Image (cartoon, rainbow, N blue to C red):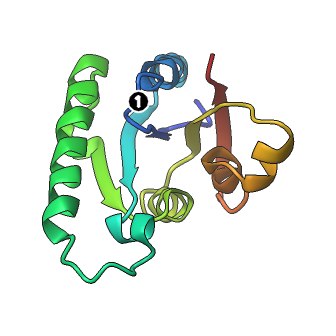
Amino acid sequence: MSIYKKVLVAIDLTEEAPQVLNKAVEVGKAHGAELMLVHVVEPVGYAYGGDIPMDLTELQDQLDKAAKEQLAGYGEKYGVAKENQVVTVGRPESEIHRLSEEQGVDLVIVGSHGRKGFQLLLGSTANGVLHGTVCDVLAVRIQ
């Protein structure tokens, strides 16, 4: 019996996502685990600091729709069922923590660029996920 039954794979929908997905599929197969793909769309208001007096709902909806389409493409390519493809809006670390608890996840897989020095001080999603997740975390080194 495997220690990993449900694996949350957090991807950022960049050209680097397949590196994380390939590793996740290997881990999933090795453990007979169910994979769950997650992409977190940051609220548009964050980018503008909420200072611009305009309705960003339509832009947010377009970003969400585009993310869902991209995630569905990855889901199809990597054999992840529709019900295990989640696009959510918020801060990536917080949403990944929330989903991993809600979904009873045993392992979170996330990409990491292996930043050093000043960039590391600014923090990364992988670092944020690691600190505060209640289960194991695998950071896949992005080449």
The image shows residue 113 at horizontal and vertical percentages of: 66, 31
The amino acid at mark 1 is Thr
Task: Tell me if 76 is positioned left or right of 49 in this view.
Answer: left
Residue depicted at 37% across the width and 39% down the height: 37
- Quadrant position of the N terminus in the picture: top right
Considering depth in this image, is 51 or 27 the residue closer to the camera?
51
The answer to whether 87 is drawn above or below residue 15 in the figure is below
The answer to whether 78 is drawn above or below residue 112 in the figure is above
Q: Mark 1 points at which residue?
A: 14
Q: How many marks?
A: 1
Considering depth in this image, is 43 or 69 the residue closer to the camera?
43
Asked which secondary structure carries label 1, the reply is loop
Residue depicted at 57% across the width and 37% down the height: 110
Task: Tell me if 90 is positioned left or right of 27 in this view.
Answer: left
The image shows residue 135 at horizontal and vertical percentages of: 65, 52
- Tell me the quarter of the picture where residue 137 sits: top right
- Residue furthest to the front: 52
Residue depicted at 65% across the width and 45% down the height: 126
The image shows residue 20 at horizontal and vertical percentages of: 51, 25
Task: Tell me if 20 is positioned left or right of 34 in this view.
Answer: right
- Residue furthest to the right: 117
The image shows residue 44 at horizontal and vertical percentages of: 33, 64
- Quadrant position of the C terminus in the picture: top right
Task: Tell me if 131 is positioned left or right of 17 in this view.
Answer: right
Mark 1 surroundings within 10 Å by alpha-carbon count, few (fewer than 14), some (14 through 19), many (20 or more): few
Residue depicted at 54% across the width and 17% down the height: 30
